[in-house]
Image (cartoon, grey):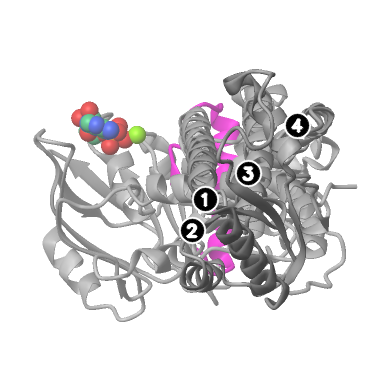
Amino acid sequence: MRRETIRVQLQGDDSIARFENVGLRYGLGPEVLQDVSFSLPASSFHFLVGDSGAGKSSLLRLMYLALKPSRGLISLFGRDIQTTPRRDLPAVRRQIGVVFQEFRLLNHLSTFDNVALPLRVAGVKEADVTRHVVELLEWVGLKDHLKARPPTLSGGQQQRVSIARAVIARPKILLADEPTGNVDDRMALRLMHLFEELNRLGTTIVIATHNMALVERLGRPAMRISDGRLSVIPGTRGGEPKRESRESPPSRAAVPKPPRPAAGGAATDEADPPGIENFL
Amino acid sequence: MFNVKRSDLPLDKDAHSRFLPWLIAFMVFLAVLAFGGILVLGATAAKWDQGVGGTLTVQIAATDDPTRDQRNLQEVLNLLASTGDIERYQVIDEARMLRLLEPWIGAGAKVGDLPLPKLIDVGIAQGGKLSIDALRARLAKAVPEAAVDDHRVWLNRLVRLIQTVELIATAILAFIAFATIGTVVFTTRTGLSVHKEAIEVLHLIGAQDSYIAGQFAGRAMLLGLKGGLIGLTLGLPALIGVGYLAGRLKGSALPEVSFGILEWCMIAAIPLAVSALAMSTARITVLRSLARMP
Ligand SMILES: Nc1ncnc2c1ncn2[C@@H]1O[C@H](COP(=O)(O)OP(=O)(O)O)[C@@H](O)[C@H]1O
Ligand SMILES: [Mg+2]
């Protein structure tokens, strides 16, 4: 039953990420991942579940190109990664937003500079950088902390900075590794609604978590890793929410439209939205 | 509100960033002296190579026949007179020659006691095209007793000595360049490992290798320039001081050599060259190290 689901998904054409028989081992150790095959359609929303040490972070690392698979094929945005020349990989990475488990904010940089990093790396003009970053930080409720360094922020605030950095360049896919790992349930649910909001705007989302209660509550499909193998748990709300989907839970009716994060410095002329802190 | 000239890596706070300029300053100080030395020696050797102050000596050996000696002398003088590019010539009188020989033959010698050769001091016009070998051949043909001494043997030894010293100075310069490269490679590698985490984050959010390398290269260029200017500031007075002391050794065999605009420009360019060297070294070091990341 589950295998069939996977095969059906493999045939999808608008696949954002596709794994075929991927295996991963660290050094000479055992295979942490074995024969992992899946395909994520554009604008889909998946959880990635499994016990601690099952290989969730490893799978995400393969997806954000921090690791090369020991075997198998990975293609992102229709591109075979193994045959992509190294100098073309940064352009692929810019389409991927990552919320690292430990945030990995640069402690010597201000909140503003941390969030600005993906735009600067992509060569966006400084005037546009300033506008987009201030707008987004306002939206995640951190406009009073533009100059603060990450170590002076609370865990929840750092979480939001790292999410802002992940989405500022408007990636096609967002990968979040245990983003609710060190926040309380209330905050976890708020963050989930933020990800759903981004997904509604078209971003493909993969969230690694071991919080099964949260997964069940959101009713999204999940990929489950155990013993190095992947299986799919279908969601109760439909696995592939389309971008145009008008269906939204009542709690989101009051949610302001987030600013369109910067895409190559494109101008956005939307009025200042109320802060997300009302929402979070 | 936000500074434009910023760096994503806190390289300016690294401890090694603080000692690098001083190391480079020391290197540049040595380089200025070595390079100044090379320029002086090169100019000196070139001048000497053209003949010391453009002089040579014609010597006519004495024979048993005084009339023949007289005729030989007249013939040589005629020949010199008809040769172009000769500024002046003067027969050294015998009384003066005896004075010069006093240490060897004693004070009592009189003209006529010894068969003294005739010596003619010849001044060659500056920039003239006189071929000394041709002059020697013509003299030998006309007067077999005449010989030309253009101080070649003595000069060749001096020029060779100068060239050796020059070679050593060049080697010192090369050593300085290697030491600078080594220092920059070391500090860059230290920086790479200190900022490993930040570099990995930059890499994962899509920074090109050249973007990361540019941050290190820009930093190395600034530090190199700073060190280079300190080194030049210390090296110039030292160089001028050495030049002043050498100038006071008047009457020595050292020909007068002074730097022109070109030479001063070359010396002033040393900090720029070192800065460029530091920049490209840092860049290459970072690119090589990043090539190992997936
Ligand atoms: N850098 C590494 N080197 C060696 N083994 C690793 C490394 N990272 C993870 N592992 C191993 O791979 C397995 C999966 O780890 P991980 O992907 O972090 O699991 P999860 O994120 O699901 O907790 C674990 O057994 C872990 O010990
Ligand atoms: Mg993990």
Q: Is residue A74 above or below residue A160?
A: below
Q: Secondary structure at mark 4?
A: helix
Which percent across, then down, holds residue B208? 50, 59
Tell me the magenta residue range: A176-203
Mark 4–mark 3 Cα distance, whole angstroms, equals 18 Å
Residue at figure coordinates x 57%, y 52% from the top left: B59
Same-subunit check for callouts 3 and 1? yes
Given the image, on which type of amino acid does mark 3 rest? Leu
Of tags 4 and 3, the one toward the viewer is 3
Residue at figure coordinates x 57%, y 55% from the top left: B211
Q: Secondary structure at mark 2?
A: loop
Given the image, on which type of amino acid does mark 4 rest? Gly
Given the image, on which type of amino acid does mark 2 rest? Glu
Give residue B145's mark: 2
Q: Can residue A199 be found in the magenta stretch?
A: yes
Of tags 2 and 3, the one toward the viewer is 2
Disc 2 and disc 4 in contact, CB within 8 angstroms: no
Please name the residue that numbered disc 3 is placed on: B41
Mark 2–mark 3 Cα distance, whole angstroms, equals 38 Å
Q: Nearer the viewer, residue B145 or B136?
A: B145
Please name the residue that numbered disc 1 is placed on: B61
Chain name for mark 4: B
Please name the residue that numbered disc 4 is placed on: B235
Horizontally, residue A256 falls left or right of residue A221, namely right
Which percent across, then down, holds residue A272? 86, 60
Disc 1 and disc 2 in contact, CB within 8 angstroms: yes
Answer yes or no: disc 4 within 8 Å of ligand 1: no
Same-subunit check for callouts 2 and 3? yes
